[in-house]
Amino acid sequence: MLARGRFRALRGRRVGLVCNPTAVTRGLVHAADLLAAAPGVSLGALFGPEHGVRGDAQYMAAVGGERDPRTGVPVHSLYGETVESLRPRPEALAGLDALVFDIQDVGTRYYTYQATMMLCMEAAAAARIGFVVLDRPNPIDGVHVEGPRLRPGFESFCGLHDLAVRHGLTVGELALLFRAERRLDVQLEIVPCEGWRRALRFRETGLPWVFPSPNMPTPETALVYPGMCLLEGTNLSEGRGTTRPFELFGAPWLDAYRLAGDLARERLPGIAFRPVSFVPTWDKHAGVRCHGVELSVTDPARLRPFRTGLACVVHARAQAPDRFAWRTEPYEFVRDVPAFDLLCGSDRERRAIEAGAAVAELARAFAPEERAFERRRRPHLRYE
C-alpha cells in the first residue's frame, strides 16, 4: 500500500525502519529494499526486534548490531542483554525524521513485537520525530478478544501495557490505542491494509506467510499460540525442538491417552486432541521421549486458545503434580515474578490452578476483563 501510494507518507524524509523478515510485499520484496530505492525517501537505519532483522536468532537470544549487507545502512538491535536494549537509543535516532514500523504480529499480548512498537513510539515521541505504521492483518482475526488483563506489578517485555492476551487488533490499531492510553505526543500515521475485514484469518487473505519468528512456522501455529505459549511458564515442553511448536506439548512422565481424554471431556470449542509421543531435538527435554497431545483446530472461528492453553496446564499438572513445576528462571528480563504469572498478567490463574480450580472456574474469573477490554479497544478499530 505504501508503494502503491508512491511512498507519499515518507517523501522528503530520512527514516529508520523497524522490521524483520515479514516486512515484505505480496511479491516478497523486503521493505528495506523498497525504501532504499524509493524516490524521495532516504533510508537511514534498520532496527531489529527480538529474532533480528533477518529472523535468525532464537527466542530470548540477544541480537547484535551490524550493517545490512544489501542496503549498507546500519542495523541497530532492539533486543540485547538488558532492559535498556529494548528501545532505540537517542543517538540511533539522530538525523531521522521518522520511524517506520513494518512487522507481522500474531495477535497476542506476549508476542514481543507489539511491545517493541510501543517502546519505539515512546522513543519517537521523546526525539520529536514521526512514527509510521505499515499495517498488516491480525492473522487470527480481529473479532475475538480473550484472556485476562495485565495487572500492575506484572509488567515485562511479554506484557508492557494492559491488553487482553488475545487483543483482536492490528498493529496500526494497537498504535492508536497506545498513543491514546499512554498519552504519547507523537505524530502517528497508519498506512492501512486494503481489503482486510475483521473476521478474516491469514489463510483467507491470499498473502504469503513469512515466519515472524523461528517457532511460528505457520498461520495455524498462530491460532493456538495465545494459549499454548503459557507452557513456557512450566516445565512442560511446548513443542520447541519439533516441527510443530505450540501444536504439540508434553513431558516424559505424562500418559498421552489419559491426557487426551481429560482434555476432550472439557468440550472446548473448535479443537481436538490426539495422543502423541515426540522427542524434542533441543530446548526442554531435548533428546528425551515426551508423551502428550497434538492440538488440531477443527473450527478457527469457535476456537478459544487461551482457555485451551489453561486446560492443557490444568490437566497435565493434575496427572503428576509432583513432577510438574512452574518455571522459576528469569523470563523476559524479570527475575522475581514467575514466568507463568507474567504471561497471565497476574498470579491469580497460577494460584487458582494450585488450589484445584476447574477450567470453567478459571474462565469465569477473567470473563469480565475480556468485556472491559472490548469496550476499551472500540474507539481504535479501523476495519469493518
Image (spheres, rainbow, N blue to C red):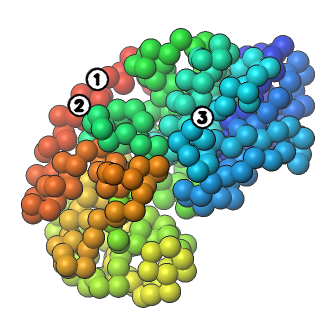
> Residue 67 lies in what quarter of the image?
top right
Q: Secondary structure at mark 2?
A: helix
Q: Around disc 3, counting alpha carbons within 10 Å, would you say few (fewer than 14), some (14 to 19), or many (20 or more)?
A: many
> Identity of the amino acid at label 2?
Arg
Q: Secondary structure at mark 1?
A: helix
> Residue 206 lies in what quarter of the image?
top right
Question: Residue at position x 65%, y 13% from top?
Answer: 128
> Identity of the amino acid at label 1?
Arg
Question: Residue at position x 25%, y 44% from top?
Answer: 346
Give the CA distance from mark 2 to mark 3: 31 Å
| Disc number for residue 371 | 2
Q: Which quarter of the figure is the C terminus placed in?
A: top left
Image location (x, y in percent) of residue 239 = 45, 71
Q: Which residue is mark 3?
A: 87
Image location (x, y in percent) of residue 376 = 32, 23
Q: Nearer the viewer, mark 1 or mark 3?
A: 3
Q: Is residue 124 left or right of residue 30?
A: left
Disc nearer the start of the sequence (1/3): 3
Q: Which residue is mark 1?
A: 375
Image vertical order of residue 33 relative to residue 11, above or below: below
Question: Residue at position x 20%, y 65% from top?
Answer: 314
In the rendered image, is residue 143 in sight? no
Give the CA distance from mark 1 to mark 3: 29 Å
Q: Marks 3 and 2: in contact by CB < 8 Å?
A: no
Question: Residue at position x 23%, y 62% from top?
Answer: 311
Image location (x, y in percent) of residue 323 = 25, 79
In the rendered image, is residue 162 in sight? yes
